[in-house]
Image (spheres, helix red, strand yellow):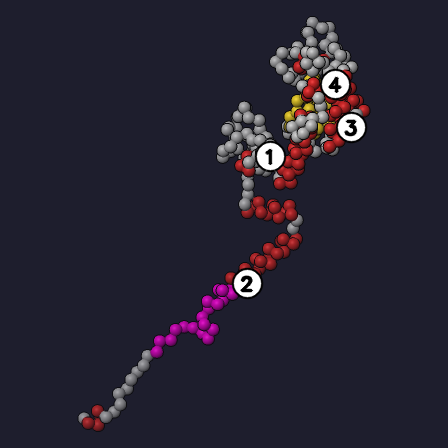
Amino acid sequence: MSAQSNVAPIIIKKKKVSGGDGHHGGAWKVAYADFVTAMMAFFMLMWLLNATTEKQRKGLADYFSPSIPLSRISGGGNGAFQGDSMFTEEIKPQSGTGATDINPMDAQKAQGATGVESDDKREQEDDKFRAIEEQLSGRGGESMVSTVMARHIVTRVTDEGLIIELFATDNAPLFEEGQANPTALFRDLVRMIARVSGGVTNNVAVGGHIRSHPVVLAKNPVWELSHDRADETRKLLESGGLKASRIHRVTGHADRKLAVSNPMAARNNRIEIIFLRE
């Protein structure tokens, strides 16, 4: 019994070994794969920036952040759909500028119909048109026309361009009654517009409008007379310095587009000189 008590006890030690290798596990492989993928995406981005044009890059940017237009023409109000209603008749629709073409808000600018470049070009044209309006009205300083002449001028900017309307009154006609012979007042007005036209390079359209004649006439001269007056205006513009190559069209509208409700009113005798958009 004493001999057996002197024998050293046998100790069995169990060591738990985790499954791994000498490279600290496989987590580094995942990190390395993420790094290589990021580098590949970076070099692809650099290559795309170098191999594409500015317009192509704008197209790529719009693909990831699209601005889908609901309509090529926007209404004239605020709101989610840029207008009071799709059937709004009280507000004039605008293409590219929304509710106003003077001080448009970002939310009021139409998307899709016009891009960044065309919007900038339109704004530059509008600035030139407004400068001409200021010269004719005297808002920007000294007016180029007298008070008497200014009473016969109305200007407005539309999608077609800048429309300068020269109209007659009961006491101051632009042409001799029933003829295409211009009065001294009309000659001065057209020469003044010819001088103003030197500030822009836009083409010009001329339209003639006259009042209605009694239906009892055997031969109604409204078509011939309106065209003859428009053509006489073209000649005055060219003699005033406007290049003949800038005349885009000369049209006689007869009495089909009246300015006032009374078809026989002298106010319907008018000439429209339009600086067309480029």
User: In the rendered structure, which disc, 4 or 2, sits on the residue that comes first in sequence?
Assistant: 2
Q: CA distance from mark 3 to mark 1?
A: 30 Å
Rendered position, 187 above or below 244: above
| Residue type beneath disc 4 | Phe
Rendered position, 146 above or below 278: above
| Residue type beneath disc 3 | Leu
Task: Single out the mark in the foreground, 3 or 1.
Answer: 3
Task: Single out the mark in the foreground, 3 or 2.
Answer: 3
- On the question of residue 274 being in view, the answer is no
What SS does tag 3 mark? Answer: loop
Judged from this view, the residue extending furthest toward the front is: 142
What SS does tag 1 mark? Answer: loop
Q: Residue at x 58, y 58 (%)?
A: 42
Q: Which residue is mark 2?
A: 36
Q: Which residue is mark 1?
A: 96
Which quarter of the rendered picture does the C terminus lie within?
top right
The label on residue 42 is none
Mark 2 burial class by Cα count in 10 Å: few <14, some 14-19, many 20+:
few
Q: Position of residue 170 (x, y in %)?
A: 68, 11
Q: Which residue is mark 4?
A: 186
| Range shown magenta | 15-33
